[in-house]
């Protein structure tokens, strides 16, 4: 679904949603999911589709998470066995820190055909919102989900930053980099922060930080 702006949904994603009768979304109540709220603005006919809610608990217990993945894969497999095509909606791009990858492996292991459709990555949209290039010339770019992997060299994209801001702020201030943070990129409540010292401690879940080497 891209990062949040319905105008950033690809034409291919719109076509697939339109063609599939069943849409799976990452929430028990599918109509309350962020992915649905984005999709319905670009593909209004999704309201008439059969919506399936998939439960992905946000917990650290791997056994609980894996059980949820297997359950979701079984739900989709039963629909495929009945001759249906299922479109699974996810935010951003499905190849980047996305739960869908686990479901894909389980389905493919059981012989089902799965097609991954690329979307606009959140960090590309965030860079555009902040008005900065992610890299120029030979500059390296690193994408991390864990603050502990930040070593201060190159250009950094720090995903899943909410909840780590207070720990990260000082390190970024000491790095001497130009720092940009985009909260809820592409959504109506989007906020952009310039400078590590301005990073909010109460940043919302969809917050991404770009730390660029000064020219």
Image (cartoon, rainbow, N blue to C red):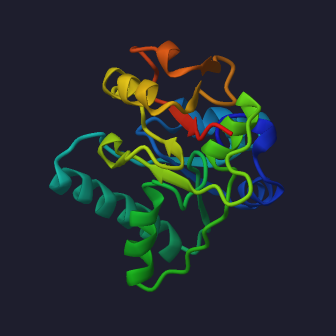
| Residue 16 position in % (x across, y down) | 74, 61
Q: Does any portion of residue 130 appear in the rendered image? A: yes
64 and 197: which is toward the camera: 197
Residue 199 is left or right of residue 35, and the answer is left
Quarter of the picture containing the C terminus is: top right
Locate residue 20: give its quadrant: bottom right
Residue under the point 42% across and 48% down: 54
Residue under the point 52% across and 30% down: 32
Q: Does any portion of residue 33 appear in the rendered image? A: no
Residue 202 is left or right of residue 67, and the answer is right
| Residue 14 position in % (x across, y down) | 78, 53
| Residue 78 position in % (x across, y down) | 43, 69
Residue 31 is left or right of residue 48, and the answer is left
- The residue at the far bottom in this view is 111
Residue under the point 47% across and 54% down: 98
56 and 196: which is toward the camera: 196
Where 73 sits versus 11, above or below? below
Residue under the point 39% across and 15% down: 201
| Residue 69 position in % (x across, y down) | 32, 59
Where 6 sits versus 65, above or below? above
Q: Number of labelled discs?
A: 0
Where 204 sits versus 76, above or below? above
145 and 87: which is toward the camera: 145
């Amino acid at each position: 679904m891209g990062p949040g702006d319905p105008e950033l949904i690809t034409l291919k994603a719109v076509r697939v949603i339109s063609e599939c009768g069943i849409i799976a979304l990452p929430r028990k109540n599918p109509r309350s999911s962020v992915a649905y709220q984005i999709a319905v603005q670009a593909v209004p006919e999704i309201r008439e589709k059969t919506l399936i809610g998939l439960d992905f608990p946000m917990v650290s217990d791997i056994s609980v998470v894996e059980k949820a993945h297997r359950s979701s894969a079984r739900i989709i497999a039963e629909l495929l066995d009945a001759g249906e095509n299922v479109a699974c909606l996810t935010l951003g791009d499905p190849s980047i820190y996305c739960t869908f990858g686990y479901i894909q492996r389980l389905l493919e292991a059981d012989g089902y055909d799965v097609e991954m459709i690329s979307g606009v990555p959140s960090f590309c949209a965030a860079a555009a919102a902040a008005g900065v290039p992610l890299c120029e010339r030979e500059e390296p770019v690193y994408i991390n989900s864990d603050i502990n992997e930040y070593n201060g060299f190159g250009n950094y994209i720090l995903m899943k930053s909410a909840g780590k801001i207070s720990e990260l702020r000082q390190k970024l201030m000491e790095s001497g980099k130009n720092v940009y943070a985009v909260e809820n990129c592409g959504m109506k409540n989007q906020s952009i922060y310039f400078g590590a010292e301005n990073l909010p401690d109460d940043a919302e879940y969809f917050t991404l930080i770009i730390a660029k080497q000064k020219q």
